[in-house]
Image (tube, helix red, strand yellow):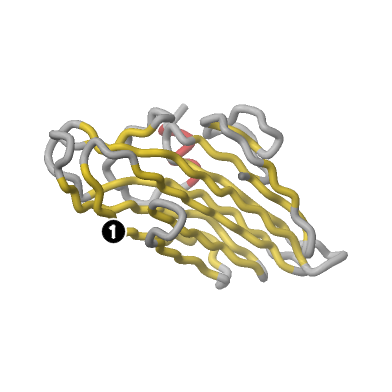
């Protein structure tokens, strides 16, 4: 789901395609994205919101969910590993950036992190321990929400989902062809765009 609006109203749209922008068009890193976009192939989300001088502010968010499987090792092998949702971006003026990762909705564990402190080059990581059997499907949801508050707050954020702590030979794959298992150091939006051109 991708949603956007100015308080107290927000409109969201749900999509099933592996990539999308707010209008339901395919999106990839480097394409314009003034509200919210995602690419499940590379576990990447972008969203941004700006304050509204005529009201309390505006918000935007992208919520993605995909089905993953550990492959490359014998099915049924217990695996303790982790998901990392790496967030980079900027926050100027009043506003907020928040990220959450959920395991096996509904009722599974979750982890969250965020900030409402202005920072021109923020980065933080949401770390979620996981335990699944190789070959069994599990669902991971990643949410990235931003708000630009009255009168001039601007929040821009990118999130990248990675998996780590896997045994030798194991990778995490999804029905959307996600296959990037190793956590990376936080990268800037420019570095991400350059890497995937």
Q: Is residue 105 visible?
A: yes
**Residue at figure coordinates x 55%, y 72% from the top left:** 117
Observer-nearest of 10 and 105: 105
**Residue at figure coordinates x 14%, y 34% from the top left:** 73
Q: Quadrant of the N terminus?
A: top right
Whether residue 136 sits left or right of residue 40 in the image: it is left
Against 114, is 37 above or below?
above
Q: Position of residue 170 (x, y in %)?
A: 18, 37
Q: Residues within 10 Å of mark 1 (few under 14, many from 20)?
A: some
Against 24, is 103 above or below?
below
Q: What residue would you read off at disc 1?
A: 129
Q: Position of residue 183 (x, y in %)?
A: 29, 47
Whether residue 86 sits left or right of residue 53 in the image: it is left
Q: Is residue 125 visible?
A: no
Quadrant location of residue 154?
A: bottom right
Whether residue 72 sits left or right of residue 5 in the image: it is left
**Secondary element at image label 1:** strand
Q: Which residue of the protein is positioned furthest toward the right in this rendering?
A: 54
**Residue at figure coordinates x 55%, y 53% from the top left:** 157
Q: Position of residue 150 (x, y in %)?
A: 76, 69
**Residue at figure coordinates x 32%, y 36% from the top left:** 180
Q: How many marks?
A: 1
Q: Position of residue 90 (x, y in %)?
A: 56, 58
Whether residue 30 sits left or right of residue 88 in the image: it is right
Observer-nearest of 93 and 138: 138
Against 134, is 125 above or below?
below
Observer-nearest of 194 and 164: 164
């Amino acid at each position: 789901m991708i949603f956007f609006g100015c308080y107290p109203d927000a409109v969201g749209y749900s999509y099933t395609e592996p990539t999308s922008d707010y209008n339901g068009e395919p999106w990839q890193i480097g394409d314009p994205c003034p509200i919210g976009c995602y690419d499940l192939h590379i576990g990447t989300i972008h969203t941004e919101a700006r304050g509204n001088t005529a009201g309390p502010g505006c918000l935007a968010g992208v919520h993605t969910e995909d089905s993953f499987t550990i492959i490359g090792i014998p099915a049924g092998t217990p695996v303790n590993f982790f998901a990392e949702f790496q967030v980079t971006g900027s926050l100027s003026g009043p506003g907020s950036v928040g990220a959450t990762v959920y395991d096996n909705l509904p009722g599974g564990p979750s982890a969250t992190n965020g900030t409402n402190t202005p920072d021109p080059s923020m980065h933080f990581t949401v770390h979620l321990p996981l335990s699944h059997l190789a070959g069994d499907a599990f669902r991971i949801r990643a949410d990235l929400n931003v708000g630009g508050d009255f009168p001039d707050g601007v929040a821009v954020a990118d999130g990248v989902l990675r998996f780590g702590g896997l045994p030798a030979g194991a990778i995490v794959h999804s029905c959307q062809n996600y296959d990037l298992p190793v956590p990376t150091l936080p990268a800037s939006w420019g570095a991400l765009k350059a890497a995937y051109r």
